[in-house]
Image (cartoon, rainbow, N blue to C red):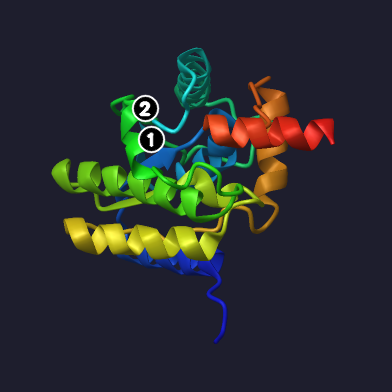
Amino acid sequence: MNKVNYAKELEKKIEEFQKEGRIPSLLLHACCAPCSSYCLEYLRQYFDITVFYYNPNIMNEPEYRKRVEEEKRLIAEYNRQVEIGDFEGMNSDLSARKIEIIEGDYVVKDFLDAVKGLESCPEGGDRCTKCFELRLEESAKVAAEKDFDFFTTTLTISPLKDADRLNRIGNEMAKKHGTFFLPSDFKKKEGYKRSIELSRKFDLYRQDFCGCEFSRLQRLAEKES
């Protein structure tokens, strides 16, 4: 079976919108500012974006607050660029649009309930699948309730995240809640590399674990070994 190139699928969608002369609304689930940086830079030229920051998997509240404030700081910087028309050194241009943000409910118990029994799974396994389902289902609900044209996630920018799994889950949740998932694999075309460049440019806080306490402990063990 041929592997789907989700980056090309996204490009095809964008070409369709441009031919139609329309700018769809997009709810972008964001996991953190570094991962958001390239996704927002790229997508804001073609969509009216609202970031949905929903990550109950971040089990340490100070860590959660630090990450969400970095997300807001990045969005404020991008919006400032639009206000003053200053895109020097950026891949965007004057067609870039301002970005809104919605912060979802931060209830760690929702994550713990979702992954119950899978706490000892290695990073990237079944526990992560349940975590993706939790976050993408909530994103689909909000997209449907607020009548967004599409929703998608920044998670596909990570080299450690399976784009096939994320796109499959996104489409399942879109069908379940009567909305549409925008295909993506943001790591392609050096998207991940660009996210690192942007993180340095804006001095973004980059964590070395995904978010949950289980991934943090695994990362610590890897460092020690």
Tell me the SS state at disc 2.
Answer: helix
Residue 45's place in the image compared with 52, above or below, is below
Relative image position of residue 49 (x, y in whole percent): 36, 39
The quarter of the image holding the N terminus is bottom right
Q: Is residue 209 visible?
A: no
Q: Residue, x 35% and y 43% (percent of image)?
A: 114
Q: Is residue 115 left or right of residue 184?
A: left
Residue 126's place in the image compared with 4, above or below, is above
How far separated are the C-alphas under marks 2 and 1? 6 Å
How packed mark 1 is, by other alpha carbons closer than 10 Å (few <14, some 14-19, many 20 or more), is some
The quarter of the image holding the C terminus is top right
Q: Is residue 202 visible?
A: yes
Residue 138: numbered disc: none
Residue 108: numbered disc: 2
Relative image position of residue 210 (x, y in whole percent): 58, 36
Tell me, yes or no, whether the two marked residues, 2 and 1, touch with CB atoms within 8 Å. yes
Residue 188 lies in what quarter of the image? bottom right
Q: Nearer the viewer, residue 197 or 167?
A: 167
How packed mark 2 is, by other alpha carbons closer than 10 Å (few <14, some 14-19, many 20 or more), is some
Residue that label 1 marks: 112
Q: Residue, x 58% and y 25% (percent of image)?
A: 86
Extreme bottom residue here?
A: 1
Residue 221 lies in what quarter of the image? top right
Q: Residue, x 70% and y 52% (percent of image)?
A: 190
Tell me the SS state at disc 1.
Answer: helix
Amino acid type, label 1: Leu
